[in-house]
């Protein structure tokens, strides 16, 4: 028996969850403050439409996927786990570290699965990149930089950093296995008081450094994570087609008679099995519900991401 999942929040990303869960045979219900929107999806996907006020106490719902505006995530997650539901909460799971900690503590106290929608951790190209790093193919990782740029989306509550950076921070934390000891943020607001451009500079305990650039006001799309090691460099570029998403550059740099010399080699493109990250994420969620194993992207990681976002945020007048 597959777990019976309800999706709370039928907006842009919630609709992706709805369609993916339907394809996986696990969609039981949809719920939204906009009743007509929920009923539209229920009719389209042949599932129940349940009012948000009645959703949490329903015995026929095993777990809830939450894709709400982030200011509502923590209270909804607490209510869900107190009613015995497992939860997958979209990022960011809250707008304050304190709210996130309350939600994660509630899930732990009630023995519930608390998973976070850091979907790029389930991207086949990232999984392959992580495996290459773990196998020592890049040598010792010394620097990581990520660029996530594009036009939109624009939110009234969270800026470019909070909206775009959680994905990259989740990947960076997976690679480093540690929380940064130093965080410095820079931001620029053009439209209102929220940053449309954001830079994060981080230093980790072993000296590894990382830089993240996020923009929602950029004329072109860029979705690139670059990892620089002592033996090789790797680039995960999600804008590229599948056969070019993961490239390894085996450049060499050395000193010769007091002068620096280097060879620049052509990239080697690594075979990556195609797969939809959201499908893989939701399959993992279903597996965690059934096995009671802790999720790969759990609450503690999400709290760390929020701590970094908070430390790196820039306020504008």
Image (cartoon, rainbow, N blue to C red):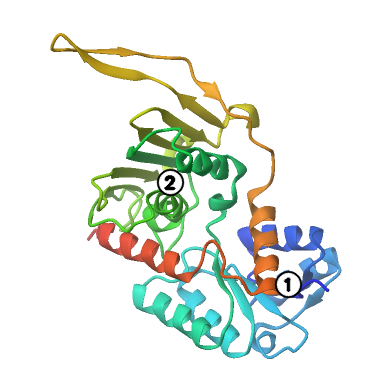
User: Where is residue 209, by image quadrant?
Assistant: top left
Across and down, in percent, residue 105 comes to: 45, 82
Across and down, in percent, residue 123 comes to: 59, 46
Q: Is residue 278 above or below residue 292?
A: above
Tell me the residue at 36%/33% (across/down): 228
> Would you say 40 lies left or right of 187 here?
right
Tell me the residue at 39%/55% (across/down): 177
Q: CA distance from mark 1 to mark 2?
A: 29 Å
Give residue 38's mark.
1
Q: Nearer the viewer, residue 15 or 236?
A: 236
Across and down, in percent, residue 215 comes to: 39, 44
Residue beneath label 2, please?
A: 216
| Badge 2: residue crowd in 10 Å (few <14, some 14–19, many ≥20) | many
Most distant residue in the left direction: 258
Give the SS element for disc 1: helix
The quadrant of the image that shows the N terminus is: bottom right
Q: Is residue 27 above or below residue 99?
A: above
Q: Is residue 166 above or below residue 190?
A: below
- The reply to whether discs 1 and 2 touch (Cβ–Cβ < 8 Å) is no
Tell me the residue at 69%/89% (across/down): 54
Residue 220 visible from this viewpoint: yes
Q: Nearer the viewer, residue 52 or 27?
A: 27
Across and down, in percent, residue 208 comes to: 28, 44
């Amino acid at each position: 028996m597959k777990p019976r999942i309800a999706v709370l929040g039928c907006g842009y990303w919630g609709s992706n969850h709805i369609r993916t869960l339907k394809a996986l045979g696990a969609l039981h219900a949809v719920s939204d403050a906009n009743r007509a929107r929920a009923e539209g999806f229920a009719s389209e996907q042949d599932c129940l439409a349940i009012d948000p006020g009645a959703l949490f106490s329903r015995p026929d719902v095993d777990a809830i996927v939450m894709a709400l505006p982030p200011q509502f995530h923590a209270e909804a997650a607490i209510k869900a786990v107190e009613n015995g539901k497992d939860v997958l909460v979209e990022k960011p799971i809250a707008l304050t570290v304190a709210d996130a900690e309350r939600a994660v503590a509630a899930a732990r106290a009630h023995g519930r699965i608390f998973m976070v929608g850091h979907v790029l951790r389930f991207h086949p190209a990232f999984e392959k990149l992580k495996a290459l790093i773990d196998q020592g193919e890049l040598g010792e990782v010394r620097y990581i930089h990520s660029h996530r740029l594009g036009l939109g989306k624009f939110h009234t509550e969270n800026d470019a950093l909070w909206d775009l950076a959680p994905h990259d921070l989740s990947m960076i934390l997976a690679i480093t296995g540690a929380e940064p000891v130093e965080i410095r943020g820079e931001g620029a607001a053009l439209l209102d008081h929220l940053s449309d451009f954001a830079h994060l500079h981080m230093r980790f305990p072993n000296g590894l450094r990382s830089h993240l650039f996020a923009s929602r006001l950029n004329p072109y799309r860029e979705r690139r994570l670059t990892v620089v090691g002592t033996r090789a460099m790797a680039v995960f570029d999600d804008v590229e087609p599948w056969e070019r998403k993961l490239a390894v550059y085996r450049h060499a740099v050395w000193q010769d008679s007091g002068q620096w010399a280097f060879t620049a080699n052509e990239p080697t493109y690594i075979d990556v099995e195609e797969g939809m990250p959201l499908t893989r994420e939701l399959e993992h969620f279903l597996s965690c519900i059934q096995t009671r194993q802790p999720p790969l992207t759990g609450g503690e990681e999400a709290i760390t991401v929020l701590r970094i976002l908070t430390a790196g945020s820039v306020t504008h007048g």
